[in-house]
């Protein structure tokens, strides 16, 4: 299977190249960029020199079809929705890592993204690829909308509780912390090293684009869910997300049954690892890999459950989950090309 | 005024030395340590060479009284409560930076600290020095119990809402993030550079010693308060705490009135800076200083208020607030020796 | 004494504001910027809110003279040389933190900076303000050219050996390492947090603008000096420079006499601290201060001397040394406003 | 092929586990530790949970032989030399990642390590595994002494010049910078996060154990080499080494011929990447991989050549090179299991 990557110069694109290099069934046949055509991808990323030697090409569906059966799009907001129809016409399979096809209601997209939404038909065709919860749909998909990084960490942590209706829908608060690579590769003052190093920021309070995506995900498993409180912070580190999730339990629950709930829920999910009682994951423990590590506890004093969910934002939160979805879509073993050990330390 | 520092080899002690070096009215006359007597403080801290030249001495109240009128204790849990009575007998004024005198109920201390509590009389005599909220008591105190770093950030952010009964007492969740200096100067695997760098941890979920201290503080301004949910995280940085505080508003409130509430509340507090609408502080913006910067917003969708409160854990969260308290206790201008600009970047 | 700061929005300017805030004799009366006129300096730097409240003004010598007697320029290359003559005409004293007046030979400036050089007369008038070595000239100066950050660390470390002709002039190699704030406040891909964090770079090998400045400084104390080898590296940290200086001793020397040489040389220099045998300074030990800490050793195996010199690039390498020079120029005690303890940790 | 790892709880051991997980021909059959027997390796390293499930066993050559044909030792100084003879008796192949067998002259080891040296016979049998330069010997080895991290970066950078006698033997200075993981996993004050973050240190000036190893390596390709100057610094980052190597050219050389020399020298070395003119590698560009990236330039002003050589200290500087050596020893393709792309950013 040959794959093209559109938007290859961003961090998501670079991570697809890294991970697919060790995928036994998928080969990167071409890389595409609207801004840096004509240069080699290894001029944008010196770490690829002597390993990957591909020119950045224009985005042409017909040309892409001649070299590939599959396309990954890792493009800024508002771009992929106009490219994908042309790719589908050529009979290509598509995984969209951008947010363009994630929100099922067009008005939600237009409100939170401030851009025109994709066509209804495309939104309907797109399968939301939160792998662990949508395996069947993913298996039959032609277009996959790959989840956002924050929604991946948040939903994998919250859904086991939500699905079983164990928590009060109005009580959910998600306090999320992300590494700076989540902001992409464009230099800006806030991400200038001396401004971000030894610093901790909060940003986009109650305004992050991922809020409606998380709400949509929760609602799809318990329709009583409406709005949530969701805050995003920037940590002076390169990779990793932690979502600390708070919810009121509808009734008291033991540590043991709480843990069994999560373990049962993810029994067949090789990339979700549930920690034993009193143990919580750190972001570095999934560094560079597709794992989502989860710790969970119940506080008798307050009646609240705390779930701690960590991922690598560029892997399980982007390129890794995209490949996991493709594996399932192609009928391959889910872990193909992704069975690697976190880089620690 | 001459001051002795007991427990001078920890970060709190070193920070007292740094700040008092530029205090026009207080001079460090001696430093004390139970573990490193006989060596010079500048052997523990090379940055003090050619500036501070003091031997670490044994802890002897009579000897201390000959050189000082004031004592700062920056000792591990369980130590200061046994030293302070002897210091008071000598007529010394005392500021305790440890947690020994913070909890008014002895059984609370014994439950959360796992150590024998201080005597009732000493607890009654000690004034809880959350400066902005206790100026009068501080002014008349002989023994000040200096607040913990997390409680300082949390209470300064939450109390304006609590005092006015604007939030549902059962709804408060505080998600706190601290720099690693908060863990003290003892090397341990979790704080070993390669394990902590590029990493983000959660720790002591629902078990942190500062929980009862925050609850006690909230309760003292609205007795309907009982338990809160409080989580602590470690950020890969040296200094700084951010407390992200979530609370359900009892009724809708405008951004304008919310901001006015905070501004009025801290009008006479030179170290608390309230940010304008849509602006939130980062930890680096108070680096090395006694400021507490606060941002606040109300989310109409969820009815929740989010308060963001940042401090330097070693200054406003320890040595700086201690000096601020002493200034008030001595009748000096509150900012004496603390009127410095944050180190940025 | 009132001072204006031109180029106040860069890190050098911000650091002048920080340090002068605690200077008893100098007050910042106005701040100037060619790019951000009309906004308040505390909009560029939120850490200044509630402390410094100054609008950024246009650069007008006559207007400046009405409010100030002294001007600091912290401008990009090629700017100050055209502004200073107008300031001098108004009778203002000037300290230039840029590189425009550092090289005495115009062709050197034009070769290394790639810009037209300042007029000969201005270059002659300007005193090179490496304080410890030029106190007399500084005391009588009207225009001070403040040294570069790398030359400050390098020359303070090398000159004691050079002046005594203890090393072979052709043997000097300086391997310098700088924090990222040395690159200024303009965001760029190389300084984008995810690219610089957990990374170590070398840059401008044999091409750094500071090479001729260091060579000029060495030559002025031993004219046999000609070219040196000088390399610059970027360390993933905010502040600090270390220069590791290697030189062949002309004859064997003992550790003791080597140390005495340095101690004698800097006996009257309160900001230079010589470390005892086998002890070397780290950059954090001078953090936020005007100190230059020096360690030195002789290797019998190779006959080479190694000098380790550390400074805070924004203080002793820029704003701090500028103030130290002004203190001397004004007849104040050298340490006025600079007698602070490094921020550690 | 089955492999045992002795000293599995250190960073070198953990890295062997990570890399061998994706090696198609070698499987980790057992892990051994003298200090933590009985616990599971994934208790020491939580990132291994659900992936690697191996108890830490005692070190028993007979037992090891039943499960393995190959042994990696990643032990502290002075340990492996006593274990290896027993392993060889059992017919096991051995790769020693410690320094015990690197120095061919026993008195050198005893001088620099301060410990009794290995027996002469064992030293003679051991092949120094600087792969690119010793492929033939490695192919026929039974015991491989894996090079130190600093010597790997230094020798790969310097040997092309040394072998061709292009540089003055007495002129070599190597200024090396290492990430903190090079110090191992034992917590200590110098590596405590608040002390090392935003800090840059020099250490063991002229006293590092790797000095005689580098000198021995240089001498083996040009016997005129005797002593070198070598300095080591700690960078606040997790992984990576940069060696900046300075040497006087015996005669002027063009950039082009310099580059061709390096390219020819490493033409058949897939892990050494030579950069084009004016381009220098950063440590992050080899992060997590076995690559050694080299930049080189000649300065006409000084007649000096500067070589910049970067590696990941835990991979090419330890576990990766060990596996590369085993590949060659076993007749496998050199890149087997190591053909991965650096983790960037």
Image (spheres, coloured by chain):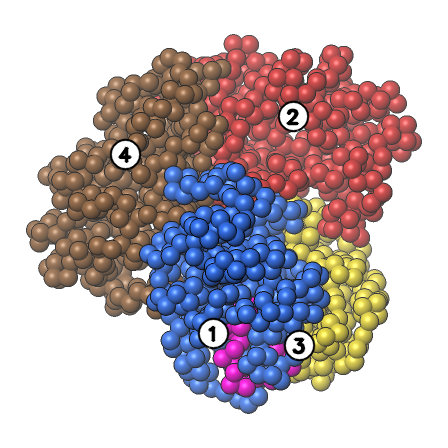
Chain colours: A red, B brown, C blue, D yellow
Q: Nearer the viewer, residue A48 or C282?
A: C282
Residue at image point 67% right, 56% down = D282
Where residue A291 appears, x then y in whole percent?
61, 35
- Dot 2: element: loop
The residue identified by callout 3 is C227
Q: Residues within 10 Å of mark 4 (few under 14, many from 20)?
A: few
Q: Nearer the viewer, mark 2 or mark 4?
A: 4
- Dot 4: element: loop
> Could you tell me which chain the residue with mark 3 belongs to?
C
Marks 4 and 1, how far apart at CA: 48 Å
Q: Nearer the viewer, mark 1 or mark 3?
A: 1
Where residue B254 appears, x then y in whole percent?
42, 17
Q: Nearer the viewer, mark 4 or mark 3?
A: 4
* Residue range (magenta): C149-175
Marks 1 and 2, how far apart at CA: 66 Å
Q: Are marks 4 and 1 on the same chain?
A: no
Where residue A332 appears, x then y in whole percent?
76, 29
> Could you tell me which chain the residue with mark 1 belongs to?
C
Marks 1 and 3, how far apart at CA: 26 Å
The residue identified by callout 1 is C137
Q: Are marks 2 and 4 on the same chain?
A: no
Q: Nearer the viewer, mark 1 or mark 2?
A: 1
Where residue A175 appears, x then y in whole percent?
48, 29
Q: Which mark is residue B268?
A: 4
Residue at image point 69% right, 53% down = D286
């Amino acid at each position: 299977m040959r794959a093209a990557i559109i938007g290859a110069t961003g961090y998501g694109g670079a991570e697809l190249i890294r991970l697919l290099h060790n995928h036994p069934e998928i080969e990167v046949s071409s890389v595409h960029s609207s801004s840096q055509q004509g240069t080699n991808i290894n001029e944008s990323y010196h770490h690829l020199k002597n390993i990957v030697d591909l020119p950045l090409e224009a985005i042409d569906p017909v040309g892409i079809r001649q070299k590939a059966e599959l396309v990954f799009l890792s493009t800024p907001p508002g771009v992929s929705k106009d490219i994908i129809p042309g790719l589908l016409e050529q009979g290509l399979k598509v995984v969209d890592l951008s947010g363009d096809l994630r929100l099922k209601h067009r008005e939600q997209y237009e409100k939170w993204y401030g851009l025109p939404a994709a066509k209804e038909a495309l939104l309907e065709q797109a399968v939301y690829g939160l792998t662990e919860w949508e395996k069947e749909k993913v298996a039959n998909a032609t277009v996959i909308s790959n989840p956002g990084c924050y929604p991946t960490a948040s939903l994998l942590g919250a859904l086991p509780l939500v699905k079983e209706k164990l928590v009060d829908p109005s009580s959910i608060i998600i306090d999320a912390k992300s590494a700076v690579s989540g902001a992409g590769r464009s230099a800006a003052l806030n991400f200038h090293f001396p401004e971000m190093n030894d610093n901790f920021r909060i940003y986009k309070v109650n305004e992050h684009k991922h809020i409606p995506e998380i709400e949509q995900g929760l609602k799809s498993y318990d329709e009583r869910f409406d709005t949530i409180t969701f805050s995003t912070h920037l940590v002076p580190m390169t990779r990793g997300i932690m979502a600390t999730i708070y919810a009121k339990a509808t009734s008291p629950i033991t540590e043991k049954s709480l843990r069994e709930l999560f373990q049962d829920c993810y029994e067949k999910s090789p990339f979700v690892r549930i920690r034993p009682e009193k143990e919580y994951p750190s972001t570095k423990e999934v560094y560079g890999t597709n794992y989502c590590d989860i710790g969970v506890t119940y506080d008798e004093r307050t009646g609240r459950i705390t779930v701690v969910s960590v991922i690598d934002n560029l892997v399980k939160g982007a390129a890794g989950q995209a490949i996991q979805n493709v594996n399932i879509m192609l009928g391959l073993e889910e872990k193909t090309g992704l069975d690697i050990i976190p880089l620690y330390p």
